[in-house]
């Protein structure tokens, strides 16, 4: 506040963050009791809009300031993460309502309440889903400045025990990895002069060789496109050179799961076969001709309009082609897994692949055990990749 009693404008810049206006009704069986603390809002907005009985400390008496604080902190999580946590928060509150837990005990929740919640979900949800629900409740506590009174060792024990009660239907089939051979088969079945096939194949090869998540290069719905969140043609830098004259293509992702504000860069290099992402991308630009501010993989849907390439349309087209080559278990995440395995099979050092895929931990090494295609090479009497083992295998614990 200035000497004349006015607020300095540099500390009160308006924030252009809008809540979702078109709300969907709750699904049957997932309807919470009416409460002014839990207004009906979209899943992505629940962390911020649903408030505990006790909000932040009593010194936060200015509601306008508190609202701005919550708005800024809430943006530290990517939209998809907020939606996932919003779903978990809904399940938690329905559980509390159904077990007549006083609203004062919803937050801060004690250890017994969380353990009771986990045991209640056991048998209905997978271990991973229950863990995400608990993380959602933890994040909700943190966002609203409430103490998290849960012991990590007890929490881990309770979550691990739920594996024994998970229904077979709650367990997803393992994602089959895409391979270069599979992508070549897909290429032969596509008509790359077709706008959709041109965009889809460019997206597929870029995702595979840059180790992207498919959601980072597509959109969730036609009306969700934002240049500050989704990748555009302007975010592509082709033929960037290093000091040795080696060329790569860089794509800047404006918003990612781990860097929702600054975004991250991904890279790929030209390939000498028909899976080459550069050739596929240039073909897409020729066929669909998107402008610099259009979505990177926008495609000509009709004579006069472009349509965004959504995740659903991409996977649907992949599914149609996969049936023709009898590869029915192909999912979007299989591209990221397959790209990782491809680079490891080429002898790319393990830490380089980890950096390319932007993994912050070694948890993704589970893929090495899930897919025999890479392990088999190390299990021979004379391992085929013996010269590369020390570089490609994970470092010792």
Image (tube, helix red, strand yellow):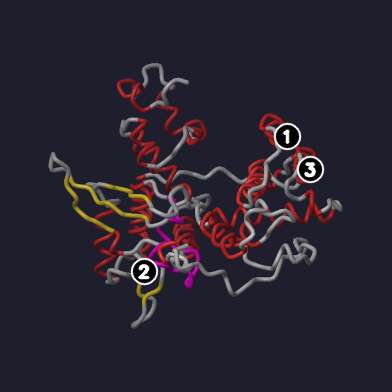
Q: CA distance from mark 3 to mark 2?
A: 48 Å
Residue 129 in percent (x, y) is at 65, 46
Upstream in sequence: badge 1 or badge 2: 1
Q: CA distance from mark 1 to mark 2?
A: 46 Å
Upstream in sequence: badge 1 or badge 3: 3
Residue 181 in percent (x, y) is at 36, 45
> In this image, 138 relative to 376: left or right?
right
Of residues 27 and 336, the one nearer the viewer is 27
Residue under label 3, please give it: 113
Residue 332 in percent (x, y) is at 48, 52
Residue under label 2, please give it: 298
Residue 331 in percent (x, y) is at 50, 51
Tell me the SS state at disc 1. Answer: helix
Tell me the SS state at disc 3. Answer: helix
Residue 92 counted in the magenta span: no
The circle drawn on residue 70 is none
> In this image, 142 relative to 202: left or right?
right
The circle drawn on residue 158 is 1
- Marks 1, 2: nearer the viewer: 1
- Marks 1, 3: nearer the viewer: 3
Binning the other alpha carbons within 10 Å of mark 1 as few (below 14), some (14 to 19) or many (20 upward) gives some
Above or below: residue 349 compared with residue 174? above
Pick out the residue farthest to the top: 381
User: Which residue is painted at 63% across and 45% down in the image?
Assistant: 135
Of residues 122 and 332, the one nearer the viewer is 122
Stretch of the chain drawn in magenta: 213-229
Upstream in sequence: badge 3 or badge 2: 3
Q: Quadrant of residue 63?
A: bottom right
Of residues 294 and 154, the one nearer the viewer is 154
Pick out the residue farthest to the front: 3
Residue 217 counted in the magenta span: yes
């Amino acid at each position: 506040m200035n000497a004349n009693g006015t607020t300095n404008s540099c500390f009160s810049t308006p924030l252009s963050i809008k809540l979702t206006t078109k709300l969907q009704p709750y699904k049957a069986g997932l309807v919470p009791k009416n409460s002014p603390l839990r207004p009906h809002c979209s899943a992505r907005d629940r962390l911020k809009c649903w408030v505990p009985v006790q909000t932040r400390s009593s010194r936060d008496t200015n509601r306008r300031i508190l609202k701005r604080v919550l708005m800024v902190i809430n943006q530290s999580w990517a939209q998809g993460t907020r939606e996932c946590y919003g779903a978990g928060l809904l399940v938690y509150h329905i559980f509390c309502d159904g077990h007549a837990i006083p609203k004062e005990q919803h937050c801060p929740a004690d250890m017994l309440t969380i353990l009771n919640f986990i045991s209640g979900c056991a048998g209905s949800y997978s271990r991973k889903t229950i863990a995400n629900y608990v993380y959602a409740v933890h994040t909700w506590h943190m966002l609203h400045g409430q103490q998290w009174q849960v012991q990590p060792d007890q929490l881990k024990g309770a979550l691990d025990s739920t594996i024994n009660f998970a229904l077979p239907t709650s367990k997803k089939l393992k994602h089959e990895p895409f391979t270069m051979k599979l992508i070549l088969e897909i290429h032969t079945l596509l008509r790359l002069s077709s706008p959709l096939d041109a965009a889809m194949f460019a997206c597929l090869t870029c995702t595979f060789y840059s180790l992207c998540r498919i959601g980072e290069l597509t959109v969730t719905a036609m009306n969700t496109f934002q240049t500050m969140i989704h990748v555009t043609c302007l975010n592509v830098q082709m033929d960037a050179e290093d000091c040795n004259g080696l060329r790569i293509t860089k794509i800047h992702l404006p918003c990612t799961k781990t860097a929702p504000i600054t975004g991250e860069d991904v890279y790929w290099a030209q390939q000498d076969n028909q899976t080459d992402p550069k050739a596929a991308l240039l073909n897409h630009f020729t066929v669909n001709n998107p402008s610099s501010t259009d979505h990177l993989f926008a495609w000509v849907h009709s004579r006069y309009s472009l349509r965004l390439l959504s995740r659903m349309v991409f996977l649907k087209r992949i599914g149609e082609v996969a049936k023709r080559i009898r590869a029915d278990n192909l999912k979007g995440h299989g591209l990221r897994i397959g790209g990782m395995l491809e680079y490891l099979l080429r002898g790319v050092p393990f830490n380089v692949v980890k950096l390319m895929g932007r993994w912050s931990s070694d948890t993704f090494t589970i893929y090495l055990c899930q897919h025999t295609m890479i392990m088999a090479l190390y299990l021979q009497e004379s391992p085929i990749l013996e010269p590369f083992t020390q570089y490609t295998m994970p470092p010792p614990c």
